[in-house]
Image: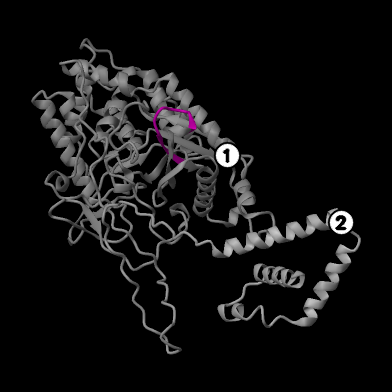
Amino acid sequence: MFFEALRELYTTAISATKPVNAKSAKGIKSKSDPSTLGIVFMAFVCAVLPLDISQLSFAILGAVLYALLQKSDQFTAKKPPIPLVVNAAPCAPKPKPSYTPSKAGAHAKPSIPATPIIKQETRTSSIQPIVTPTFQSKCWEGEIQELLLQITPTSEVEQIVNKLAQNMAQAIRKIIPEIEVTGFASGNLTSGKAFGVAVPEVDIIANASPHILFERLHGHSTKGSASQLDAKKLQKCAIRACTDRLVSAAGFKFRRSAFRGQEPKVTLLAPASLGLFSESIPIDFAVNVVTPFYNAALLTECGQIDSRAKELILIVKRWAKDRGICHAAKGHLSPYLWGLLTIYFLQVGVTDEGALLPPLDQFEMSAGLLANDKRQKASADTPKQRKWKPAQTMEPKKSVGQLFKEFVKFFETQFDWRNEAVSVRAGQRGPPSVDLPLNIMVADGAATSQVGPSVEDPFCAAQNLAEGMNSASFARLKEELSRAAALCSRGASLSELLEPWVPPDFESGESHHHDELSNGSGKASPATGTCQPQASTTSIPTTPPWRRTGAPATKAANAVA
């Protein structure tokens, strides 16, 4: 009996430590090796001999109890698994992968498709649609003053932008320690909801010398120097590197890139989770650009010369933004250019009261930016003109609301877009200079062409800032000027004038083909009016949009924010 119990213990140990199949388990008792049993018996005797009678009795009792427990586990029936049922809405069955069996046999594994399945996108209405602005005042002048209170940057907004610039500088200095970051606010963050992401109110500019950028981004061991590298390529490379850092480490969100313009930039979103503002802040980020500095200098000095000039610039920019004609990526005039048009009007277009602003060389601060210009050096030896003073007249000063109506009328009926140039430098009407290149616009699918607007860069006379304009954007410009002139002539309210622009095909119930769709052409469903892109067989790029080279710049995320 003792040997039988020992054999049972041995069988149980072998079955517990080494899995066996069903056939070998049946004959495990009868086919045990006698030599193995002898070795086990001798080991057992050697272990038992040093023990006294009490220890031996406890050992035998424990072995018997262990054997009984093992026997009871074998006869215990296992409970069947309980199926888990989840009530879910019926979904479309997944398509089975189609493959051809290989020649090796019928059990070959299906080949995994190289491109992932692309889900169809459906455009829906915005959760927070843009509505027409409303005002408490009932008269035109009251609405203008109320709008100015809403859109004028405040000291609180400037503090938020400065903190935003500091946060971005702290993140970027991990890769470029010498960089300097500056922020500019061209409007109030609580206003300007229409096209807010397409045309941000905040510009963040990072500045560093090209040599430092070259060393930090390419390393000291790289052959060549910064002077041998294309300045535009170095600028774009720095923007990509900074964007990588801001998105991955600082919590910013990427929206789009615009590398085809005169000054490459990216549009980022500073989420409310950063703790700077209660809402997300769209920002334009660029490296080593000068336009935001010029814009801030001109806006500040215009306000010092005549407060109405700064107010009119803000209102014109807001009108152009709400009506969708200041998105430069679409070929429209940028907000900076609308500011130049306003300054030019105040120089040459104000009736009765005379010019409200002088030529650029009479600006105290901005004139210093012309020191490196060839024309300025050539005229350095000429006698200086007398300091400009506004015309003395008995006529009462016009309000900002009246000036806006004259602005619209001037560019709608009096200004010759083909034969005249907007020149803030000269401060007088005339044709484009011989150094200014003309913008020849060719309509899509048409054999005819036309001369586009000429807007001279105040700080570089040989640069036409309106060179990105096309025939479609120029037609929209004239359309909006005609609409504004008609509304002003019949005494419409400011709310009606600033009603956010909606594409005509969207108004008619069809979807608007925004240019940010990157999956190819889309087809509009006649029942729902949504845009569903066709399935694409091309692979989805894994690199961030701002890092793709050789491809067109990523367009706006939403035409109407």
Image coordinates of residue 311 in percent, x first then y, are 31, 22
Q: CA distance from mark 1 to mark 2?
A: 77 Å
Please report the residue visible at 44 percent of the width from the left and 82 percent of the height from the top.
108
Queried whether the magenta region covers residue 280, the answer comes back as yes
382 and 280: which one is in front? 280
> Residue tagged by mark 1?
171
Kindly identify the amino acid type of the residue bearing the numbered disc 2: Ile
Q: Which mark is residue 53?
A: 2
Outermost front residue: 1
Q: Is residue 6 above or below residue 244?
A: below
* Up/down of 549 relative to 410, above or below: below
In the rendering, at what x and y percent does residue 286 appear? Answer: 47, 42
Q: Amino acid at mark 1?
A: Ala
**What sort of colour scheme is used for the picture?**
one colour
Figure label count: 2
- Quadrant the N terminus occupies: bottom right
Other-residue count near label 2 (Cα within 10 Å), few / some / many at <14 / 14–19 / ≥20: few
Instruction: Give the residue at the far bottom of this rendering.
Output: 103
- Secondary structure beneath dot 2 equals helix
**Image position, residue 242 (x, y; %):** 53, 45
Q: What residue is at 21 percent from the left and 15 percent from the top?
A: 142
User: Is residue 315 rendered to the left or right of residue 445?
Assistant: right
Query: Which circle's residue, 1 or 2, is located before the other in the chain?
Result: 2
Mark closer to the observer (1, 2): 2
* Residue at the image point whose x is 79% and y is 58% from the top: 59
Residues shaded magenta: 274-285
Quadrant holding the C terminus: top left
Q: Quadrant of residue 74?
A: bottom right
**Quarter location, residue 421:** top left
Find out whether residue 516 is within the magenta segment.
no
